[in-house]
Image (spheres, helix red, strand yellow):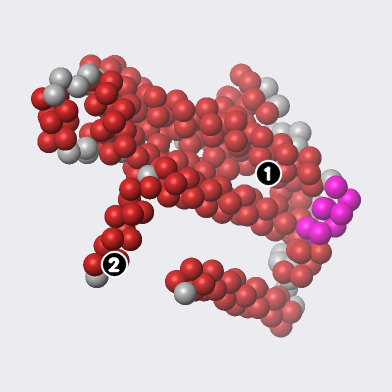
């Protein structure tokens, strides 16, 4: 029943939003170049799928996002773990990373395009920069939040530093790490779209930017819907992986519900 309501409530909300959107446009006679009906957006989206022109843009955006997300997440996890384990390394590297994070990525976009060109490489770099920091911070916080008594108990039995990290600290920080991964999904899409809007040869951001020049609102909304769908799918996938990997938390939550 709980699973049914978790699906039903968002569908009801979506239906209400679409109805309000449709009747607002129709009753207020809003011009098409300002806002169009949901039906017109769906027809435009369907036409792109029928003629196949949308697949090039989808492939470009998804490729840049996935590559950048994997690279950025890997770097964030490795550097976060190193900084959590070494205060000396933190003193050297952390200020530089904070400076990079504090710099607006939109301001860096033109410079990145000059360095890496107008192809997919520049979008990948933007995604790496944008999705890196949430996971980086969460990894440090999660590892340092592990119960010190557990670490001391392992060391009392002469456990190696690598053993403690692998079997105590990393599992203890898993939820924080997955929270950072989930935030990174949405941010990675933002990074790709920013790069495509600045300058690109393809992609959903490029499609939206081109449509904006021509005041083609239906195409703009079609691109936004696809980006939202990819963001939701990616977020749900990370949540699914979280439940599978950090399985002991799911069992603990089930026990808590049973006791209550």
Give the label on residue 249, or none.
none
Give the label on residue 205, or none.
1
Residue that carries the numbered disc 2 in the rendered image: 258
Residue 108: x percent and y percent? 53, 29
Query: Can residue 80 be spotted in the picture?
Result: yes
**Is label 2 in a helix, a strand or a loop?**
helix
| Dominant SS in magenta | helix
Tell me where the magenta segment starts and ends, as one range: 44-52
Residue 240: x percent and y percent? 49, 50
**Residue 228, placed above or below residue 135:** below
Is residue 47 covered in magenta?
yes
Instruction: Please state if 229 lies on the left or on the right of 161 as rendered.
Output: right
Please name whichever residue, 44 or 245, is drawn nearer the observer in this view of the structure.
245
Please name whichever residue, 67 or 41, is drawn nearer the observer in this view of the structure.
67
Query: Can residue 102 be spotted in the picture?
Result: no
**Is label 1 in a helix, a strand or a loop?**
helix
User: Does label 1 or label 2 sit earlier along the sequence?
Assistant: 1
At a point 72% along the width and 69% down the height, the residue shown is: 38
Comparing labels 1 and 2, the label whose residue is closer to the camera: 2
Residue 257: x percent and y percent? 30, 66
Picture quarter with the C terminus:
bottom left
* Count of marks placed on residues: 2
Instruction: Please state if 142 lies on the left or on the right of 62 as rendered.
Output: left
At a point 47% along the width and 50% down the height, the residue shown is: 239
Is residue 77 covered in magenta?
no
Residue 155, image quadrant? top left
Residue 23, image quadrant? bottom right
């Amino acid at each position: 029943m709980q699973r049914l309501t978790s699906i039903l409530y968002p569908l009801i909300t979506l239906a209400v939003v679409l109805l309000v959107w449709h009747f607002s446009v129709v009753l207020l006679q809003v011009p098409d170049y300002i806002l169009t009906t949901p039906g017109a957006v769906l027809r435009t989206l369907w036409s792109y799928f029928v003629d196949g022109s949308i697949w090039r843009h989808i492939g470009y955006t998804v490729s840049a996002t996935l590559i950048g997300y994997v690279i950025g997440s890997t770097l964030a996890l490795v550097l976060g773990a190193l900084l959590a384990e070494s205060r000396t390394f933190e003193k050297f590297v952390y200020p530089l990373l904070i400076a990079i994070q504090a710099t607006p990525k939109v301001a860096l976009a033109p410079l990145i395009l000059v360095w890496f060109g107008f192809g997919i490489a520049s979008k990948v770099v933007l995604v790496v920069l944008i999705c890196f920091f949430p996971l980086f911070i969460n990894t440090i916080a999660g590892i340092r939040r592990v119960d010190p008594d557990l670490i001391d108990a392992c060391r009392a039995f002469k456990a190696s530093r690598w053993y403690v990290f692998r079997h105590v600290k990393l599992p203890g920080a898993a939820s924080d790490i997955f929270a950072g991964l989930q935030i990174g999904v949405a941010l990675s899409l933002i990074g790709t779209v920013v790069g495509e809007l600045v300058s690109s040869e393809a992609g959903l951001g490029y499609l939206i930017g081109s449509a904006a020049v021509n005041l083609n609102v239906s195409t703009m909304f079609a691109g936004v819907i696809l980006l939202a769908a990819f963001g939701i799918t990616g977020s749900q996938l990370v949540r699914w992986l979280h439940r599978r990997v950090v399985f002991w938390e799911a069992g603990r939550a089930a026990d808590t519900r049973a006791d209550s």
